[in-house]
Amino acid sequence: MRIDNANARALSRIHAVRPQWRTVVAARDAVGLPDYTLLHAGPPFGDPREPSAPVRSSAVLCCLYEGWAKDEAHAERLIVQGDVRLESAQSYGVVTPLAAVISPRTTLVEVDDANDSAARAWSLLGSGAGPQMRFGGRDMRVLDRMQWRDKVLAPALEAALARGPLDLLALARAGLADGDDLHARTTAATAALRALLAPRLTDASAGIDAMLAQTPLFFLTPWMAACALMLAAAARAGDASSTLVVALAGNGERVGIRLAGAPSQWITAEAHAPEGPRIDPQQQAKAAPLTGDSGMIDAAGFGAQALACAPEPAQAFEAFLPAGWRERQARVRTESHPAFAPLPGVLDAARVAREGIAPLAAIAMIGADGRAGLLGRGLYAAPPELFGRAVEHLSGDTA
């Protein structure tokens, strides 16, 4: 009963949040990120001098972009020697996709709560189609995309958003109504976002509208921040007995979760790789263990939990979905968010432990070698025993 009451209070806090895209801002200014510090997805590394290969590749690109290193070998030395420190992005209130690493100059999406402007969350601002740091490779063309993001895209979006924030719940509903799961597919939500931004962009920003038209996953990172903001409200409820999951993420080595009742504590396990359809079926590169913070979306009740409303990604994942997934996944969730009635709700670690059902997350596959980049869409099944240990840890703290 105590857990049920704690979860009910935490869930009511989640449902009260109205996430809105407020602005864009450099990480240095948003969260006080100092020089020679980089933020990565998932729980902290056991040794930040030896990150997983995809995260290391992205960190190398950031060192070059910031001007801390003159070449890749120099960047590698800075990381191995600990002169550049890698820290968990979530400890700063930031979430980042796949292997993307955030440096002080990196432009972030800033999302706040329309009902509480002091409550904020941040995620990476996308840089359009083409080479992406989040894929965890060494493509040097990414540096040009980063420069364009921070020097061209960010000022244009800052000016557009100065005319008023954008309601992310409304955009998410538009996406779901038109076949998005809001993780593997955000095509419709991105189109709705583009329609809102178009009249706010100047003639000089025509290239930005074209970029949005060519980047169907652009809505992903604002929605990651929105989900992080909503789940953080459960942690702020202050109920030490709450078993609601407020983070599900991987760093390329370990998968970790955090619960609302102990939000600063990561419970981790060795991660395995997502499985799913590959872009090139002949590509045999090994997929990296779970990498990225975007499992936040699935923990909040979207992504793999919304596949029943998203025919295209559901069909793509059909061969990789477990039997009875629609009914079974709902058994480890709370009741629906009032704005998203057809969907299951927030992931509950106590229900996972009780039912023994592995929660699903729709997280892409990237190359384990830190070179191959994006391999395809992916589904990750989180081990139920991880949630059992988290609940046991919580019980010990509240005994």
Image (spheres, rainbow, N blue to C red):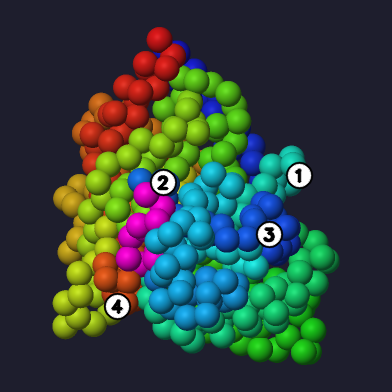
Which residue is depicted at the point 55% across and 66% down? 219
Upstream in the sequence, badge 3 or badge 4?
3
Please tell me whether mark 1 sits on a helix, a strand or a loop: strand
Tell me if I can see residue 175 in this picture: no
Task: Determine crowd level at label 2: few under 14, some 14-19, many 20+ residues with C-alpha closer than 10 A.
Answer: many
> Mark 1 vs mark 4: which is more N-terminal?
1
Residue denoted by label 3: 28
Q: Is mark 3 on a helix, strand or loop?
A: helix
Magenta residues, start to end: 47-56
Is 54 in the magenta?
yes
Q: Do the residues labelled 3 and 4 touch (CB within 8 Å)?
A: no
Q: From the viewer's perspective, is 59 left or right of 377? A: right
Q: Residues within 10 Å of mark 1 (few under 14, many from 20)?
A: few
Badge 1 is on which residue?
A: 117
On the image, the x and y values in percent for residue 380 come to 28, 54
The spot of residue 374 in percent (x, y) is 34, 75
The relative height of residue 21 versus residue 262 in the rendered view (above or below) is: below
Q: Is residue 207 above or below residue 182?
A: below
| Proximity of marks 1 and 2: CB atoms separated by less than 8 Å | no
Going by the numbered disc 3, the residue's amino acid type is Arg
Alpha carbon separation for disc pair 1 and 3 = 20 Å
Q: In which quarter of the image is the C terminus?
A: top left
Q: Which amino acid does label 2 sit on?
A: Pro
Specify the label residue 43 is tagged with: 2
| Mark 2 and mark 3: Cα distance apart in space | 21 Å
At x 38%, y 33%, the residue is 348
